[in-house]
Amino acid sequence: MAFVATSGSTTRSVLVIDDERKIGELVAHFLREDGVKVLIALDGQEGLDILRREAVDVLFTDLCMPGENGVDVLQKALRLRPQLTTVMMTGHGSLESSVDVFRLGACDYLTKPLTRQKFDAAWSRVLLARRAQAQLHSRPGRAALPQGKSLDSEIVAQSAAMRDVLKIVSRVAATPASVLIHGETGVGKGLIATAIHRQSTRAAEPFVQVRCGEVSATRPEVQLFGSERGAFAESHERRRGCLELADGGTLFLDDVGELPARAQALLVKVLQDGRMSRGETAEFVPVDVRVIAALRSDLKVEVADGRFRRDLFDLLNVVGVAVPPLRSRVEDLSSLVREFLVRVGPMRAESAFQMAPLRFDDEALKCLARYDWPGNVRELSNVVEHAALLSQDEVIGIESLPESLRTFQKAEPIDTLPVQLEGNLKQIQRHVLLEVLRRCNGNKAAAARTLGLHRRTLYRLLDKKES
C-alpha cells in the first residue's frame, strides 16, 4: 500500500531507532514507494543525535533497547522536536505500557513481529495524526488563546492538575485510541469528551452521546444498532441506532458502568469486528466509530466483582483520563466563577435587574473557597446562578449564598480511625463505615469517595444487619 498523495509535503523524513538494524531496513522497504527518507539509529543516543541535526517528521522507536529505553528516548525526542509524530515499537507489548506511551505523547503502539499489515495500519494513523496536527496549528487565532483556556473555551485550566488533563487530551485527540474518562459527578467529563472529539480528525463528523443508564436491559440492540421496520411489535418504521448515527465520528458512552450486561456483550463484538447488524436476518454492515467512555466509579472494582466485562474494559481503557474534583483544583475556582457570572448576566436582564459586571465580595469568595463542592463544577455553576439572581447589586455578598455553604464546616480529617478489635469482621467494618460517615457530616457521597467505594456499595454495606 502506498501513501504518496497523503504524505507528500507533510511527511518527508522518518527516523527508526532500534538495536536490530533489520527493523529499520524493513520500515525503509515498506516506505520505498512513498518517497520518504528513512534514517536508522541502533541506540537511543545515536537517534537523539540525529534528531538534533536532521529535520525529522516521524519517529519509530523500540521500547526495550540497551542504554536508554524507548520511554526515555520518546520524552527527550519530544522535548527536542515537540511537533514530532511518534510510534513506539516492542516485542513485549502490554496494556499498561501502551497506556504509558500514549500518555507520554506517542501516536501509536506497534507490536513485533513487524508485518506489512501492522505497519500499514500504523502508518495510516500516523498520517491522520499529522494531518490533524497541521489543521490544528492552522486555525485562525490559535496563538491568541487566553491563558488558562483550552481550545474549547468552556474548559478552565488555571490549575496544574487541569493543565495536565488538557495535555493528555491534545496528545490523544489525533489518535484513534479509545479513551476512558473518570471522575466524580459534575467534574466536566462530557466537556473533556467533546474537546477530544473537536481536536480529532473526526471533528467534522457526528458526536453521539449515549446515557448508558437509559439503555434497555432486555432489548439493547435496538438502541445500539437500530432495527428494521416490523422487526418486533412496536417497530413501525426503520430506526437507526447510536452506532450508525455515530458512524465516522465519535460515540460517547456516558456513565458506562451502568451499561446492561447484554449491551456490554454486544458492544464488545462490534468493537472487535468493526461491523454490526440491525437484526438477526439483516446483513452486516461496517461501522467506524471512535469510542470515548466516562464513568463515576472505579471500573476495576466493577470488573473484579463481575459486574463489568473485562474484555470491554480493556477495549475502552486504551488511554485513561482522570478529571480531578473541584476541591483539588481550587486555583480554577475564581476563573470558573467569572465564567458563570458572565453566563448569568442575560438572565438578570430578563429579570429587570440592572446590567452591570457582576462579582463576589471577598467574604463570599472565601466562603466559596472553603466549601468542598461534592457536586463539583456543576454545583458551583448552580450556586453562582442562585446567588447572582438573588442579589440586586453587582457586588454579591455572602447573604446571597445558599445556607448550606454559609454554615459549612470542614469534615474531620480521616488519617486515622480508632477501631475496637472486639467483635467479628462485619462489626468492625460497620464501625469504620459509620465513623467515616460521621466525619463526613453524614454525606454518603463524600464518605464513599473517602473509602474508595461506589455509593451503591456503601449503601449496601450500611443496610446489612450485623451478624
Image (spheres, rainbow, N blue to C red):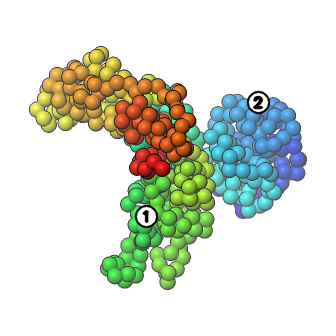
Crowd class of label 2 (few under 14; some 14 to 19; many from 20; radius 10 Å): few
Q: Residue furthest left?
A: 352
The numbered mark, 2 or 1, whose residue comes first in the sequence reads 2
Query: Which numbered marker is on residue 52?
Result: 2
- Within 10 Å of disc 1 (Cα), the crowding (few <14, some 14-19, many 20+) is some
Observer-nearest residue: 11 or 335?
Answer: 335
Q: Is residue 126 found left or right of 217 in the rendered image?
A: right
Along the line of sight, which residue is nearer the eye, 380 or 47? 380
What residue appears at the point 27 percent right and 30 percent down from the top-left corner? 404
Residue at image point 64% right, 53% down: 125
The x and y percentages for residue 187 are 42, 39
- Residue 82 seen by the camera: yes
Is 42 situated left or right of 81 in this image? Answer: right
The answer to which of 144 and 97 lies nearer the viewer is 97
* Secondary structure found at label 2: helix
Q: Amino acid at mark 2?
A: Arg
- Residue 54, given in percent of the width and then of the height, sits at 77, 34
Tell me the amino acid under the disc marked 1. Cys
Task: Indicate whether 419 appears above or below 219.
Answer: above
Return the mark for residue 242.
Answer: 1
Q: Quadrant of the N terminus?
A: bottom right
State the image quarter where residue 446 is shown. Answer: top left
Asked if 223 appears above or below 331 in the picture, the reply is: below
Q: Quadrant of residue 389?
A: top left
Q: Judge from the rendering whether residue 254 lies leftward or rightward of residue 276; answer left or right.
A: left
Residue in front for this viewpoint, 160 or 373: 373
